[in-house]
């Protein structure tokens, strides 16, 4: 998909809906939607009535403006409705009439974990080329129709899932045109050979460029090291991307973009009856399969250190292991505990010990990124080559001490306050809520998750944090990767 950020003091921090940054391997993220320009911004003058009855593109630009102005309207007490469509798709729906907008997202078990290693990159190319041609439309016609109706398509791919999203006006003419286009893109992609070759070339160029950067090298080697022999640890290579054929895309779409495996998230100014019709309309023409697709089991790595030569002045350090599934009961203790350890920015222990007291790094962080299976726990920093050993020693002391002692009462209270007080701001728009809806559906979380979140966080104890870290962050499984090591 080219795939969602609760508390994020560090760009790669996650509270369960975001995946770590990167593209193509175990360290992937839902990339930002490929937003198309919203024309008509210059038409936002004159009377409101003339704008509303004007061209669709101007109306949608107005709606985007209203969306930003309405961001202060927190969606507290969200009512999530759920049902199974006749096609077999799982549907999650929130009705809200605050703005005349409809947001729809479809998620599939079509992430990079399902691509064979010899053709790593297949998942991203499949999702990325959905808009390249569908039925009798080429990519220019698809782009033109989106502009004409003032809608936009987005989406992304991470390790577990692929998504396709749509934002459109909820008024019937625009909504119907946009939904027709989305249905066509999802169910009848043509994967033009010429576009595939172009995108393969771009991807290969990007891989070659990344192979020169210490940060990208470190991320790729770290994923491979903590997931030995597992698809979560596989990243696309020049050879694997070059090996992908159009037939591979067609087959991957047929197998993974099936109706019975689809998660349909809908939020906006439509009724339950309209939402039911929308979900069925979008999924009835999809291939019938897609259900019960799960990655192979994860094997924990053995403790070790990998040093990689590079001429960079700064050493790039990653420390971690596969830690937790999104469905694990220890999620909340790890979430709250990680805030104190390294997820809370300047208030975290790692930042205080590594940066403030010793000046070993400008930034140091830790995060958890739960997935369908055990997602990574990671500590990361950059430091001068000559002091990397000292920095690693401090990190080890902080982590060992934290696992043994847990947070202090003051640290625990601060972590809870930050997570609870900031929660409303992380769901104060339709777009943000759509991310939660899709994650609730894909990971099988309770429909009451949003309502339960504050209480779950407040209920976490220091003993639970210590026990959760002891279970999931074991020293014998910690892997350290250092790029630009002496």
Image (cartoon, helix red, strand yellow):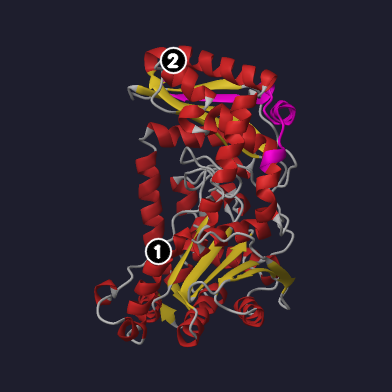
Q: Residues within 10 Å of mark 2 (few under 14, many from 20)?
A: few
Number of marks = 2
Residue hosting label 1: 69
Say which residue appears at 57% left-offset and 18% top-offset: 398
Q: Nearer the viewer, mark 2 or mark 1?
A: 1
Q: Give coordinates of residue 414: x percent, y percent.
A: 57, 32
Q: Give coordinates of residue 385: x percent, y percent.
A: 38, 17
Taking 199 as reference, is 223 left or right? Answer: right
**Residue 228 at least partly seen:** no
Say which residue appears at 66% left-offset and 29% top-offset: 301
In magenta stretch: residue 472:
yes
Residue 402 or residue 18, whichever sits in front: 402
- Is 277 drawn above or below residue 242 in the view shown? below
Q: Give coordinates of residue 51: x percent, y percent.
A: 32, 82
Residue hosting label 2: 357
Residue 156 or residue 208, whichever sits in front: 156
Q: Residues within 10 Å of mark 1 (few under 14, many from 20)?
A: few
- Is 397 drawn above or below residue 250 in the view shown? above
Residue 304 or residue 412, whichever sits in front: 412
In magenta stretch: residue 468:
yes
Mark pair 2, 1: CA separation:
42 Å
Tell me the magenta residue range: 457-486
Quadrant containing the C terminus is top left
Q: Give coordinates of residue 42: x percent, y percent.
A: 24, 73
- Is 171 drawn above or below residue 33 in the view shown? below
Mark 2 residue element: loop
């Amino acid at each position: 998909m080219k795939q969602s950020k609760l508390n994020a003091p560090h760009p790669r921090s996650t509270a369960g809906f975001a995946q770590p940054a990167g593209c193509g391997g175990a360290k992937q993220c839902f990339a930002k939607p490929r937003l198309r320009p919203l024309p008509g911004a210059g038409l936002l003058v004159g009377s409101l009535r003339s704008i509303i009855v004007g061209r669709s593109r101007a109306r949608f630009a107005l709606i985007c403006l209203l969306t930003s102005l309405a961001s202060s309207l927190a969606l507290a007490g969200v009512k999530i409705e759920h049902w199974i469509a006749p096609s077999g798709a799982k549907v999650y729906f929130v009705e809200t009439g605050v703005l005349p907008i409809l947001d729809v997202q479809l998620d599939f078990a079509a992430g990079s974990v399902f691509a064979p290693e010899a053709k790593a990159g297949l998942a991203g190319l499949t999702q990325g080329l959905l808009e390249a041609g569908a039925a009798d439309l080429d990519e220019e016609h698809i782009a033109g129709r989106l502009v004409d109706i003032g809608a936009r398509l987005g989406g992304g791919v991470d390790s577990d899932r692929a998504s396709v999203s749509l934002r459109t006006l909820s008024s019937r003419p625009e909504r119907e045109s946009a939904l027709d286009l989305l249905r066509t893109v999802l169910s009848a992609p043509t994967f033009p050979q010429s576009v595939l070759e172009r995108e393969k070339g771009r991807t290969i160029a990007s891989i070659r460029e990344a192979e020169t950067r210490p940060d990208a090298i470190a991320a790729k080697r770290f994923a491979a090291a903590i997931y030995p022999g597992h698809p979560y640890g596989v990243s696309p290579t020049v050879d694997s991307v070059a090996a992908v054929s159009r037939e591979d895309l067609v087959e991957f779409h047929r197998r993974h973009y099936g109706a019975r495996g689809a998660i349909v998230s809908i939020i906006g100014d439509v009724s339950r009856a309209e939402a039911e019709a929308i979900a069925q309309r979008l999924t009835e023409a999809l291939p019938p399969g897609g259900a019960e697709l799960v990655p192979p089991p994860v094997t924990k790595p053995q403790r070790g250190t990998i040093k990689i030569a590079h001429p960079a002045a700064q050493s790039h350090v990653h420390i971690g292991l596969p830690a937790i599934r999104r469905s694990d009961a220890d999620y909340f203790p790890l979430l709250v505990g990680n805030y104190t350890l390294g997820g809370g920015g300047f208030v975290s222990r790692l930042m205080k010990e590594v940066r403030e007291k010793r000046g070993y790094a400008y930034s140091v962080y830790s995060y958890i990124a739960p997935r369908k299976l055990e997602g990574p726990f990671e500590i990361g920093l950059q430091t001068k080559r000559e002091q990397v050993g000292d920095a690693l020693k401090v990190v080890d002391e902080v982590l060992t001490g934290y696992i043994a002692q847990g947070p202090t009462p003051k640290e625990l209270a601060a972590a809870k306050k930050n997570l609870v007080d900031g929660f409303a701001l992380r769901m104060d728009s339709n777009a943000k809520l759509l991310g939660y809806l899709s994650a609730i559906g894909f990971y099988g979380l309770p429909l009451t998750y949003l309502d339960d979140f504050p209480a779950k966080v407040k209920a976490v104890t220091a003993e639970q944090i210590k026990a959760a870290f002891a279970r999931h962050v074991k020293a014998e499984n910690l892997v350290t990767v250092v790029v630009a090591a002496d």
